[in-house]
Amino acid sequence: MIDAQGNYVPDVTPVTTTNNLVPTTAVTSSIPVPTPAQIYSASNIAQATNAPVAPPDLSNASAIYNYYLGGADVTSARTAAEADAAALAKAKATARNRQLAIEGNPLESQQFIVGQQARAGQLDNAALNALADIAGVSSANYASAKQTASEKANIALSQRSELVSLITQNPGAKITFNDTIESATGKIKSYNDKVAKDNQKKADEEYKKSLKAELIKLGISNKTSKGGTMSVKSMEKALASEYKSKSDFEKKLNSLKLKSATEKISELQAVDNAWKKTGGNWDEMIKSLQGKYDVSSGSVIDNEIRRRNGLAPIDKKSSSGTGSNYVVGPDGITYEVTP
């Protein structure tokens, strides 16, 4: 007799040969197949609703591959493939041992041994073929799971690359790796709208300073009857009295606006050049611009550097704490004027 492991066990009963085949053991796959009841169970629904799977950490490129290739789908497919491969290897070893045990039976004739080996080989081959088919399916399933995981990882890496670019190009937008491309784009738009609004406010302030400086140069007061500073409209009206024609007056206003805008553009361009040259190093930028431009706290240069580093601008007027006004004199230098 041959046991289940293929080992020979002496049989004291007479041997009777027949042509009836011994039924084979049923072979089943180790790949789990969940039922609809399991998939839509209350626990699974609660898990998906209350504790969904966390997204990958896009701040760490290597962790993205670990997240997808180490996921449940790939892990379960690998486990099934390994189990099926092990089952096939074990069945092959058992079949070999069975053939050796039959061949080494000292109590049987050569003719009987050959017949038994043929019958055992027929039965083992059927089982081995079935196990090989199952191992092939599970191996293909594992390869497919890895391929899908790799594709997902590449998509996530592509998104990470886009986010890195957006974060680098828009430091003040406060984009993080938790953002999607859509949410990052929304942050950039909101930030650019705020910057445009702030720049318009600064341009209006610079124009107001230019009007004050022009009135000072002409010896015209920029104060109201109550001692306060005139509004832009009032200063434009006061300045208009010095010009004989409306066209001359409008040309003067336009030149003041153009001067303010040109100075602002020149300073912003200088910051941009220094930013590229120093890689955004604040101290190095200040050193390269000092002596050429006003780099004091709250200046156009200082506020632009602050903006690029995601910091709020400083209002030079309000930060002085003395109620002082800043005007551009005829020589182009900024002067502090105390009311």
Image (cartoon, rainbow, N blue to C red):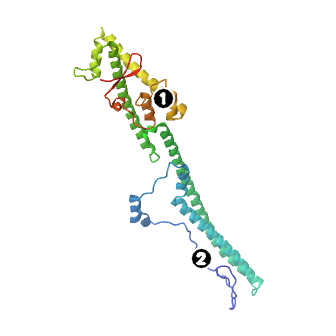
Q: Is residue 270 visible?
A: yes
Distance (Cα) linking label 2 and label 1 = 80 Å
Q: Which residue is mark 2?
A: 25
Residue 151: % across, % down: 54, 51
The numbered dot on residue 224 is none
Residue 16 shown left or right of residue 173 in the figure: right
Q: Residue furthest left?
A: 226
Q: Residue at x 69, y 78 (%)?
A: 98
Residue 175: % across, % down: 44, 42
The numbered dot on residue 271 is 1
Q: Residue furthest top?
A: 244
Residue 278 shown left or right of residue 229 in the figure: right
The residue lying toward the viewer, choosing from 280 and 144, is: 280
Residue 4 shown left or right of residue 34 in the figure: right
Q: Residue at x 38, y 29 (%)?
A: 199
Quadrant of res 76: bottom right
Crowding near the residue tagged with mark 1, few <14, some 14–19, many ≥20 C-alpha atoms within 10 Å: many
The residue lying toward the viewer, choosing from 31 and 244, is: 244
Q: Amino acid at mark 2?
A: Thr
- Judged by depth in the image, the label closer to the viewer, 2 or 1, is 1
Q: Is residue 50 above or below residue 118?
A: above
Q: Residue furthest bottom?
A: 13
Q: Is residue 41 above or below residue 286?
A: below
Give SS at disc 1.
helix
Q: Is residue 114 above or below residue 282?
A: below
Q: Is residue 236 above or below residue 74?
A: above
